[in-house]
Image (cartoon, rainbow, N blue to C red):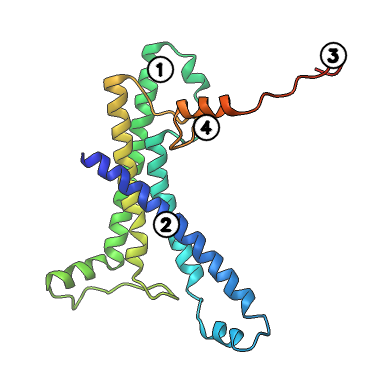
Amino acid sequence: MLTKILDHLEEWIITLLMGGATLLIFLSVVHRYGTGLSIPYVQDYLLSLHFEWAQELSIIMFVWMAKFGAAYGVRKGVHVGVDVLVNRMPTEWRRFIVLLALGCGMLFTGIVGTLGLTFVWDNGLHHAAFTLLGLDVTDVPEGPTTPDLEWPTWFIYSAVPLGSYLMCFRFIQVAYTYLVHGELPHHDESHVEGLDDADDDELFAAAPPHPQPAHGGAR
């Protein structure tokens, strides 16, 4: 149950970040070109709007999307991999190599997550945590903020530990499934989310047949 909630939360975060960043960039471009049009009142209104923060926010959203998208890629098996040599190995060796690769993924993402958490903590998270708990923050630096939005940078950089730990959890999840069932997640490029195979058959059945070449023509 909790895993399904996490799966849906992960997908919603990625969708909202991707859609929000795309919409923000579109509005920013429209605003930039609109301010160059000599239209009375409209140009003045657009010039009164400040979109200097749009580029910074869109970059932040894409960074967060990439970190959570990497974890989603592990869960769905969409990451690029070269398995030609592994597939030619005996079954027992193949199993060992797959588990070794998954273990390396756990180790790497766990290390990156821990280093990222340490950096975020020293970059101002400890000041925010001490303030929230009512502790003395006299000798604790508050940490820098972003240039345009003036958001605390520890919040922006928290995408590194959150995304890395989630990715580590996905590696553990995949390794457990492989140990128990001997299966790895595999992404089918021809499959479309929300469209079942039965729907595919109905669509192909409803499609008009391709015209056959005339006798003597090119085949």
Secondary structure, mark 4, is loop
Amino acid at circle 1 = Arg
Q: Is residue 206 left or right of residue 147?
A: right
Query: Which residue does the image show at 56% across and 84% down from the upper left?
Result: 47
Residue that carries the numbered disc 2 in the rendered image: 17
Seen in the picture, residue 48 relative to 23 is either above or below; the reply is: below
Tag 3: amino acid:
His
Task: Choose the circle earlier in sequence order: 3 or 2.
Answer: 2
The label shown at residue 169 is none
Q: CA distance from mark 4 to mark 2?
A: 23 Å
Residue type at mark 2 is Leu
- Give the alpha-carbon distance from disc 3 to disc 2, as whole Å: 56 Å
Residue 64 in sight: no
* Location of residue 146 (image quadrant): bottom left
Distance (Cα) linking label 1 and label 2: 38 Å
Which residue was labeled with disc 3?
215
- Residue 150 % position (x, y): 38, 76
